Image (cartoon, rainbow, N blue to C red):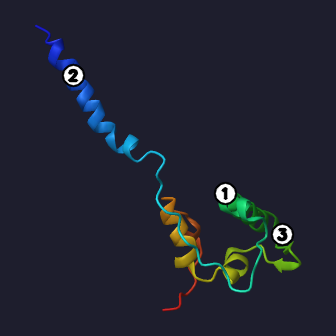
Amino acid sequence: MYDGGKIVPGLIIFVGLMTFPLWYNSGNAGPAPKLEKPAGKTACVKDTHFMRTSHMVLLNQWRDTVLRDGDRTEVTAAGEKYEKSLMLGCMKCHSDKKKFCDECHQYAAVKPYCWDCHFPPKENL
């Protein structure tokens, strides 16, 4: 009644075909995007590794302190003062959203919700 000689190889072939995209592309994320860095700036409010991996944490902390505590004190890094603000701080240096924010977020397949509330900066066309 049970035809194990055909079912087991069929299951193995099925699992192999269904998981093919996973193991075929494992370890290959494609070339990293080339982000447009701000002209004349060499440092951000934190080091590069922190900003690549945890900028969303920093932005959430800034959002919370500004909205809940009204704390808009400036952040000083490398001798420069930055305002705790996405629009008035971050976007002052990274003025081209498409070439900085969007390019990296598309590569990482992340859809940030920053622009649900903030107006995106006007791009140079």
16 left or right, relative to 74: left
Measuring 24% from the left and 25% from the top, which residue is drawn there? 11
Which sits earlier in the primary sequence, circle 3 or circle 1?
Answer: 1
Measuring 68% from the left and 74% from the top, which residue is drawn there? 86
The residue tagged 1 is 53
Which sits earlier in the primary sequence, circle 3 or circle 2?
Answer: 2
Asked if residue 26 is positioned above or below residue 119 in the image, the reply reads above
Label 1 packing within 10 angstroms: few (<14), some (14-19), many (20+): few
The residue tagged 2 is 9
84 left or right, relative to 87: right
Measuring 85% from the left and 80% from the top, which residue is drawn there? 80
How far is mark 2 from mark 1, CA to CA?
A: 44 Å
114 left or right, relative to 87: left
How far is mark 3 from mark 1, CA to CA?
A: 24 Å
Nearest the eye: 73 or 76: 76
Which sits earlier in the primary sequence, circle 2 or circle 1?
Answer: 2
Q: Are marks 3 and 2 in contact (CB under 8 Å)?
A: no
The residue tagged 3 is 71
Nearest the eye: 16 or 56: 16
Give, as a three-letter code, the residue at label 1: Thr
Q: Are marks 2 and 1 in contact (CB under 8 Å)?
A: no
Nearest the eye: 53 or 92: 53
Q: Position of residue 56 (x, y in %)?
A: 66, 60
How far is mark 3 from mark 2, CA to CA?
A: 64 Å
Label 2 packing within 10 angstroms: few (<14), some (14-19), many (20+): few
